[in-house]
Image (cartoon, grey):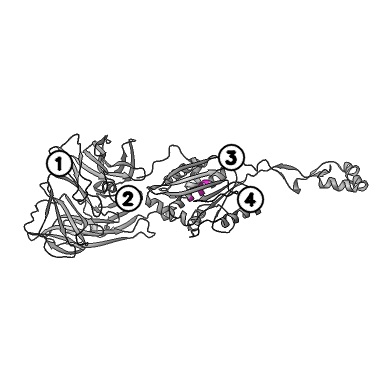
Amino acid sequence: MPYNQLTKPIKTWQSWLSWFDEDLQPVIADLLWQLSNSLGPVKESKWCDQMLSSGSGDIRNRGDYQHLLTTEWLIGEEEPDEFIRRAVSNEHLFVTPIYEKSKANGVIIALFDCGLLQLGVPRLAHLILMILFDIRAQQHKSQFYWGIIQSRSKLKLFSGIEDLKLLLNSRTITCIDDNQLDYWHNYLQESEFFYDECWLIGNNISQSDFATHKVSISRLINHFSKIAVNIVSNKVAKRFELTLPNQVICAKLLSGQFESGSNYGVINQQFIEPININFKPKISKNGDYVLMFNNENNNIHFIGISDALSQRQKCRIKFYQLKLKSKVLAIDIQGKYIFALYQEDQKIFLWGTKGPRKALSEAIQINTNHTLSHFLSISRQSMYGYDVTNILYIDDQKVLYSIFCVPKNSEEIKQVEKIAQNVIALFKLSDRHACYIYHNQDQFWIESDHLYHLPYCLKIKSIHDNLQYFISAENLWLTGFGRLAIGFEQQWQVFDNENSYVEVKTPLNWQVFGLFHDYHEDKINFLIINHDKKQVATFDYLNNNIDICLSSSNKIVNYSYNSLAQCFTIITDIGELILYSFLTRSIRLKLYQDDLHNEQ
């Protein structure tokens, strides 16, 4: 989801923001805004009132030639000692240097700690501070110089985005010591730099007389989305927490991928056969795999794309085909593997790319007249220590069943375990955990057979058969209560704990199809699609704000969302598949069918 724009335009920062890709500019502006408020205003330079000689070109004629003859040279002849004294003291009437106020302010200097204690996300604060120091210098009508504390070199005049990359590439295992600080103290004394501000940026930097400001940056043990920043000067001390972007944006910035040329490349991939517009694509937990299935020919396409931070974006498509006489009842992704339940010759089989297919005993009854609306696979650890696959599904009687099997074993599956009745929703929380919702005498419960802090009883305001159920913040569900939305059309209840909920009315002409938990801002947004099926957006119900994520010139005929991956897919009426990621806030994949194939 795009970061909200700042409350007022930052026009004065635009030249610096233009260094970055358009998707990153709101993120950089947000970080600049957070830090700029704590640096304080730029004060008048202490060097601006210094009286400096303007040089020999400004020596002024202080009298006519006759005056020269009767004064200065006569004194030189009669009183040579007095003539020399006046010359030394600039007291000659005929010539004298002109003094004027300095037209330049003192420079701004920043020295960065690039040692072990500042590797990782603290370097992100270094980048933002470097930009702010250049902004301050230009506002101050001055210049900004920077250096590395551990590097015994000269200061470098800041010149732009290449300096940001140079700072990122300056890494060392050496921590700061007094000898390094003494070097810079002596360097600044011997140099001709007149500075108004000298900033030391690092962690646990000892007292240094030459520095006007010290900035200490450290991680927070219990909060991975923020870092602690302490700013100390002779007059004031401030401490605050800098809120970071999500981990993918942080990694992109720390790898120096600033410009549009280094943006997450949209993978445009041509597809050989038509895309099945009636199948909702399955998305893997990490968002790097998409599963497509065509029930007309039983073709399975498993699409793998490069990690979001990979410099070279690639797409790999694996093809599998089941027999034409097979009827696929359900299909799912577990990690980078596929599992499918299908009927063939009056028998039911469990097939997967991880091992041979397995027949289900005839004692296991599944209604093959309907596909399974809820089917998922997770990995569990057996009592003997090895991994087994756990298949969970809800049949047409709303009964939840569980099947265990060893992937590489081809033995017949003879047992199925009945977990619960009246089950209306099933969710995957991780590769190893799942939960479900069932109702019992007008009470709704969210339960898991292997998470012992569950169940929770839910107070549903209005109960009917058309209710929809969405969960998010899956990591919170693993240890407590996460986020849950229950409702229909425009009337929703959003739960953040068992005993309280917020009633939400979603916008008219928009349909809800998911719940997005923004970890960066720790808030819930509805994922919605408009009535003409050409726009997908997030709805921030707390601020009553709609943010458009994706617009299509073609009608969207199918869509699916994976809250774990924070990705959604759409399929348009021309057979185009698009994968969008909230982590990168961009389209990751565009898959379109072969034009030649269509013509045939």
Q: Nearer the viewer, mark 4 or mark 2?
A: 4
Contact check, label 3 and label 2, Cβ < 8 Å: no
Q: State the image coordinates of residue 314 (x, y, percent, origin top left).
A: 33, 60
The amino acid sitting under disc 1 is: His
Q: Amino acid at mark 3?
A: Lys
Amino acid at pointer 4 = Phe
Q: Which residue is mark 4?
A: 193
Q: Is residue 127 magenta?
A: yes
Q: Earlier in the sequence, mark 4 or mark 2?
A: 4
How far apart marks 3 and 2 lie (CA) works out to 44 Å
| Residue identified by numbered label 2 | 581
Q: Are marks 3 and 1 in contact (CB under 8 Å)?
A: no
Q: Which residue is drawn at the image coordinates 43% and 37% (left, top)?
A: 7
Q: Please, is residue 135 above or below residue 179 in the view? A: above
Q: Which residue is mark 3?
A: 43
Location of the N terminus by quadrant is: top left
Crowding at dot 4, Cα within 10 Å, few <14 / some 14-19 / many 20+, comes out as some
Q: Quote the CA–CA distance across marks 1 and 4.
A: 75 Å
Residue 274 visible in the displayed image: no
Q: Tag 3, which secondary structure?
A: loop
The earlier-in-sequence mark between 3 and 1 is 3
Which residues lie in the magenta part?
A: 126-132
User: Disc 2 on helix, strand or loop?
Assistant: strand
Q: Position of residue 198 (x, y in %)?
A: 58, 48
Q: Position of residue 290 (x, y in %)?
A: 26, 55
